[in-house]
Image (cartoon, rainbow, N blue to C red):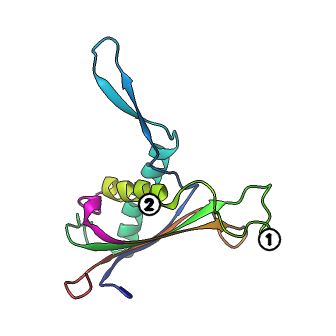
Amino acid sequence: MSATGSLVLACHIDGTPATKGSYKPVRNRRTGKTLLVGMNRHEHEWRNRVARAVRSQWFVQHPTRPMPRLDAPLAVRAVFLLPRPKSVSPTARPWPTVSPDVDKLARCLLDALTDSGLIKDDSRVIHLDAHKHYADPPHRKAGADITIHTLTKEES
């Protein structure tokens, strides 16, 4: 699939992208219920940041339209810009071939898009194009560049 349907939203979210990591079961001794607790302490902060940015950018890019709750096939493109560790030179490792995994970054982003209210559920995303790069200042800041398109029957 090359160019997709109608552009819904394109934006950059500043900050260090977080992953949708593993969860561990924790049993409440008093009630006996088991809760799943996320292992990544930065996940909720990143999801909130993405959700706020998406809502804000919707009203910047579509000032006269209320934000929809998309319930159609969608294509999402995400470029995750990760901070380069000080110990890693661009010539030694030009690509971020270490943690975090691109699939876990994408899972967290899709959950955040659902949190924002723009999409009904991340199951509506039928095409995902996700990349990770180092954000080398001063040209690029850490964060994520995302675009969301609706798909027509011919494109899906």
Residue at coordinates 26% horizontally, 61% vertically from top-left?
123
Indicate yes or no whether the magenta region holds residue 35: no
Would residue 14 be found to the left or right of residue 66 on screen?
A: right
Residue 48 in view of the camera: yes
Image quarter hosting the N terminus: bottom left
Residue at coordinates 29% horizontally, 60% vertically from top-left?
122
Residue 135 lies, with reference to residue 112, above or below; the image says below
Residue at coordinates 48% horizontally, 57% vertically from top-left?
105
Would residue 65 be found to the left or right of residue 96 on screen?
A: left
The residue to which callout 2 is attached is 106
Relative image position of residue 78 (x, y in whole percent): 47, 69
Report which quarter residue 30 is drawn in: top left
The residue to which callout 1 is attached is 91
Number of marks in picture: 2
Boundaries of the magenta span: 117-127
Residue 140 lies, with reference to residue 48, above or below; the image says below
The residue lying furthest to the top in this view is 30
Which disc number belongs to residue 140?
A: none
Relative image position of residue 156 (x, y in whole percent): 25, 81
Q: Name the secondary structure under disc 1.
A: loop
Q: What residue type is labelled 1?
A: Thr
Would residue 82 be found to the left or right of residue 35 on screen?
A: right
Relative image position of residue 152 (x, y in whole percent): 22, 83
Residue closest to the eye, 119 or 58: 119
Relative image position of residue 88 (x, y in whole percent): 78, 59
Q: What residue type is labelled 2?
A: Ala
Q: Do the residues labelled 2 and 1 touch (CB within 8 Å)?
A: no
Residue closest to the eye, 53 or 87: 87
Residue closest to the eye, 93 or 41: 93
